Image: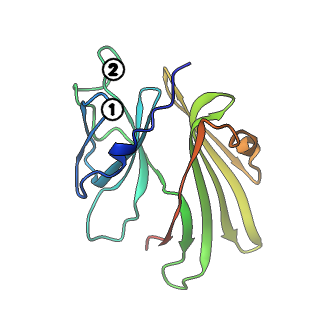
Amino acid sequence: MKALCIPLLLLSCVAGAETLQLSDQRILRTDLKEARLISEIHGYAIVAGRSCVDCDENTAIYIHKIARPGNGVNGEAGDPGSADRYTYPGRYLDYESKELVEKTRMFYGRCYEDQPALLWLSEYRDRGGWIKSEYLVLLGEDGLEHRYNEDRQPSIFYIENSLCVELPGITAETEP
């Protein structure tokens, strides 16, 4: 079993950076602004950042495959455009009404049956009240496996694992 790497010294990267230094001192190109490394898990870099500065875009989570010889990632420094955008954890207020409309928690590490994963537990406001959902991303040898559950959160039982870490949330407004 590989250890969960949480490089604490790398959490505070230079604002506006498009590259991040990984735990093995290699550089990861991200094409993100205000990028910071959250963690390295099972050959993937979990990164927070935005695609623009001075815009209405919120900070988001991105998953980058770390380039290794033979793993299919373009270029030794990685493929900066290969990461999807995921919700940063926190409480989101509607940008017009300032009403709370979403509450999201995010966990990373061994967060699903002792497998490397990222887990989002969300509640969002609908006309009838709050709806719970779960979004799970398993970090596998063959790539990412995505699972979504609406109206239930079965993976909540795995967050008590000491190798499953919660990323503290923020308070932000929804994007227009």
In this rendering, position of residue 80 left or right of residue 63: left
CB contact under 8 Å: marks 2 and 1: no
Element carrying mark 2: loop
> Residue 147, relative to residue 142: is it above or below?
below
The quadrant where residue 40 appears:
top left
Q: Secondary structure at mark 1?
A: loop
User: Which quadrant of the figure has residue 175?
Assistant: bottom left
N-term-proximal mark, 2 vs 1: 1
Q: Nearer the viewer, mark 2 or mark 1?
A: 1
Q: Residues within 10 Å of mark 2 (few under 14, many from 20)?
A: few
On the rendered structure, is 75 left or right of 3?
Answer: left
Disc 2 target residue: 72
Residue 17, image x and y in percent? 22, 51
Front residue of this view, candidates 81 and 58:
58
Identify the residue at horizontal 45%, vertical 32% (top origin).
5
- Which quadrant: the C terminus? bottom left
Which amino acid type is marked by label 1? Ser
Location of mark 1 (residue): 23
- Image coordinates for residue 146, horizontal then vertical, percent: 58, 37
The N terminus is located in which quarter?
Answer: top right
Q: Is residue 63 left or right of residue 4?
A: left
Residue positioned 32% across, 14% down in the render: 70
Closer to us: 111 or 127: 111
Find the residue positioned furthest to the top: 70
* 71 over 16 or under it: above or below: above
Q: Which mark is residue 68?
A: none
Say what amino acid the circle numbered 2 marks.
Answer: Gly
Distance of mark 2 from mark 1, alpha carbons? 20 Å
